Image: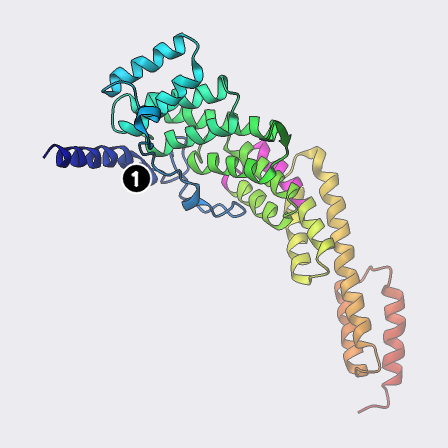
Amino acid sequence: MCGVKKIVFTAVALFAAILPAQQSASAGAGQGAGARYATDAYPGFENIRESDAPSRKEPKWFAFLNGPSESDAAGEFAYCARLEGEGRWSKAAKHYDALVREWPASAEAPAAQRRLAELLLEKDDDAEGAFEEYKYLVDFYSFRCDYGAAVDRMYDIANVLRMRGKTVMFFRFKNTEDVRRAYECCVLRAPGAAWAPAAMLTIGALREEEGHDAEAVKVYENLRNLHRDTPEARAAAVLEAAARMRLLGEHGYNRERCLETIDFLKSAVSYVDKEDVPVIECHLADAKVLLEEEAYQAALFYDSRMRTKRSAVSAYERFLAEFPNSVRADDVRARLAELKGEGKGEK
């Protein structure tokens, strides 16, 4: 009978711990400062919503080694505090974790989870581990912790991760993808935070570092849509312009892409900060040259032995209609007159 009671109690406790996270998933309607989870789509972010959520903690095997030392959560929390006071940081972190695993629905569990994250960051200098523990805190105890302070701390740690890189066997390596995912994790959990525009700007830059300009453009564009009147959005427009121009140069000519880029650049001229206008205008001039070159090459294609004079005449006329002031305009007019002269005898 005692075994049945223990199973029932454990099930109820685990459900109580999970419930706040489930409630918070629907609490993010809109993008206000109080929104806990993003409800809008975030193009350019990695699709990691399901895999991003941490797994629920459960008691570890070999409880005599990995389990709590006290018989209840209050006693265990007091024991952890004593360990901290004695400077036994690693053991304190271990027992905070054991408390959360053994008594997930207790009043002490959210505070224990937060102290675990802080000890990893402050005493073990483990920013990656601290980030994961804070993520667990906001996902499983979102309504039982200081949510705003927790996600702010996550963002601070993401900045540390970007500065430091990843530690492997005592060596540090630049790990752009993991750092980008950390920033995405922050934005998705606090879309209305004051730092959200800066985080999105960083995500776009990291996408560029990965060599994914198309994804970077999506992030910058979404940043402009969601936070249009911010300095970060205006900076994003400048970076987006450069990324769009690289896409034009790297992937061969695409008329539709070129026209879309020109439309974007025209709108950006009146949107970006004054000192950035010359940069946008330079991109715009280059994009127009690309468009003109494509139109000229298309006309030459029709002016061949494999095509009719009528097709060539139509192609040259379209070119002149679209680019009457082109440096090639005189040559095109001369060739057009020649073709029309040759075709006078045709019916």
Q: Is residue 339 visible?
A: yes
The residue shown at (80%, 62%) is: 324
Residue to which mark 1 is pinned: 22
As drawn, the residue found furthest toward the left would be 1
In the picture, measured across the screen, residue 212 lies left or right of residue 326, that is left
Residue lying at 74% horizontally and 47% vertically, measured from the top left: 283
At which x and y percent is residue 128? 51, 29
Instruction: Tally the marks.
Output: 1
Q: The N terminus lies in which quarter of the figure?
A: top left
Is 60 on the left-hand or right-hand side of 252? left
Q: Amino acid at mark 1?
A: Gln
Name the residue located 30 percent from the left edge and 22 percent from the top edge: 68
Residue 303 in the image: x percent, y percent?
Answer: 83, 77
Q: Is residue 270 visible?
A: no
Range of the magenta residues?
226-241
Q: Secondary structure at mark 1?
A: helix
Residue 265 at x, y percent in the picture = 67, 48
- Tell whether position 25 is magenta: no
Residue 230 x %, y % = 55, 33
- Principal SS element in the magenta part? helix
225 vs 321, nearest the viewer:
225
Mark 1 residue crowding within 10 angstroms, few (<14) / some (14–19) / many (20+): some
Quarter of the rendering containing residue 229: top right
